[in-house]
Amino acid sequence: MISPRIFTFCYIVLSLLAIIGSGCSKDLPRLSGPQLEAVNHNLRGIKAEARGNHELALEEFSESLRINGSVDNTEGKLVALVNISRVNRHTGDADSALKAVNQALELVTPESDIFSEVAFEKSSVELQLKNLAGAQEWAAKSIAAATGSKTTAATNLLARILYLGKQHDAAKEQADKALILSRNNSQTEEEANALRLLGTIHSNGKRTAEALDAFGKALQLDKTLGKSRKIAADLRGIAAVHAYTNSNAEAISFYGRAQSVSMNDGDRQAAAEDLLLMARLHDKMGNQKKCRQLMEERESLLKETEKQ
C-alpha cells in the first residue's frame, strides 16, 4: 500500500514543478526534457508503490535519481532518495533505507525546505534500526525545521519514540501536542495516530476510561480513512484494555474483530497473534476446547503463511 508521506512529499514537489513548467510566467524557468522524464519516473514509482509493487517502485525512483543526477538537480535527487529510503524501510530493508537517507543528508542543508522531510525519514529509519537515541535526535530536528501542518507528523513520531524509550510522561506531552496540531490543521490521519498512542499510554497507566475513549475515537477516524491495519490496531488496543480489567468476553470479541480485519487485509501474522491472544483468554476462562480449536487455527494459518 502506498505511503501517504511518499505521495504527499512527491506531489508537493511535483506541483511546484508543474507550475514552473506551465509557461504561465516568463519569469519562471521551464523544465528540461530530462527533468520532465525524472518527474514521470517518480509518478510511475508512486503508482507502483500504490499497487504494492515495491520492486518496480524502487526501479522507477532509482531511474529518477539517475536522471536528476545527470542534470545536477539536487531537489529532484532528494525526492528520489527519500522515496527510495521509504520504500526500502516499508519492505523491511533498513540497511538500504539508511544508505539512501544518508545520501540525502549529504545533499540537503538545514535551511532547505526539504530538510524536515529528510530528517523525518532519518528518524524513521533509526527507529526501525532500534536506535532510539538517534531516532529521537532526528525527530526533534524535523520538528524544529518543519512549518505549518508538517510539524504534526514529526511530533507524533517523537511521541512514539519517547514511548518506546519508556519516557511515558514525555510521550504523552508530545502526543497531546500532536493531537492539538492535527485538529487545528484538519489532519485526520495524524489525529488518529495521536489518539491511538494516547490510548496506549493510558492503557499502560491503567487509566481505563481514558484509554477506551482514545482508542474508540481513533477507531472511528481510521474507519473513515479506510486504514485496515490501523483499524485492527485500534481494536486490539480496546481488547487489551478489556483484558487487563478481566472483561474477558469483551476482550475476545474485540480481538476477534481485529483478527477478521487482519485476515481480510492479508496480514496473516497479525491475525495469528490475535488467535493466540483469544486462545489464552479462553484458557483463562476454563474453556479448554475453544482454546485448543483456536491454537489449531493459528498453527494452520502460520503454516499457510510460510508457504507464501
Image (cartoon, helix red, strand yellow):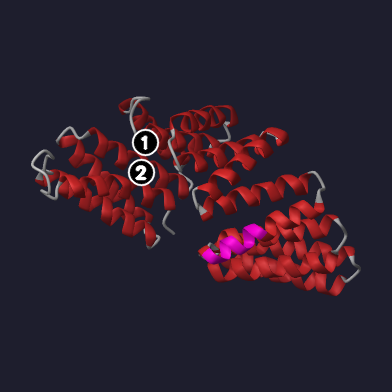
Establish if 221 lies above or below 105.
Answer: below
56 or 101: nearer the eye?
101
195 or 132: nearer the eye?
195
Indicate left or right for 109 with 1 as reference: left
User: Residues under labels 2 and 1: Cα distance?
Assistant: 7 Å
Q: Give SS at disc 1.
A: helix
Which residue is rendered at x = 82% and y = 73% of the image? 290
Main secondary structure type of the part rendered in magenta: helix
Tell me the tag on residue 235: none
Q: Position of residue 134 (x, y in %)?
A: 54, 28
Mark 1 surroundings within 10 Å by alpha-carbon count, few (fewer than 14), some (14 through 19), many (20 or more) = many
Q: Quadrant of the N terminus?
A: bottom left
Establish if 169 lies above or below 297.
Answer: above
Q: Give SS at disc 2.
A: helix
Please state the total of marks drawn on the protein image. 2
Tell me the tag on residue 100: 1
What type is the residue that disc 2 sits on?
A: Ile
Precedes in sequence: disc 2 or disc 1: 2
Find out whether residue 223 is within the magenta segment.
Answer: yes
Magenta stretch, residue numbers:
217-224
Label 2 with label 1: CB-CB less than 8 Å: yes
Q: Position of residue 31 (x, y in %)?
A: 13, 44
Q: Evaluate whether residue 138 shows in this view.
A: yes
Q: Evaluate whether residue 95 shows in this view.
A: no
Which residue lies most toward the right here?
286
Establish if 69 lies above or below 205.
Answer: above
What type is the residue that disc 1 sits on?
A: Ala
In the picture, residue 219 is in which quadrant? bottom right
Tell me the tag on residue 84: 2
Q: Position of residue 8 (x, y in %)?
A: 37, 50
Q: Position of residue 46 (x, y in %)?
A: 33, 55
Which residue is rendered at x = 52% and y = 29% of the image? 140
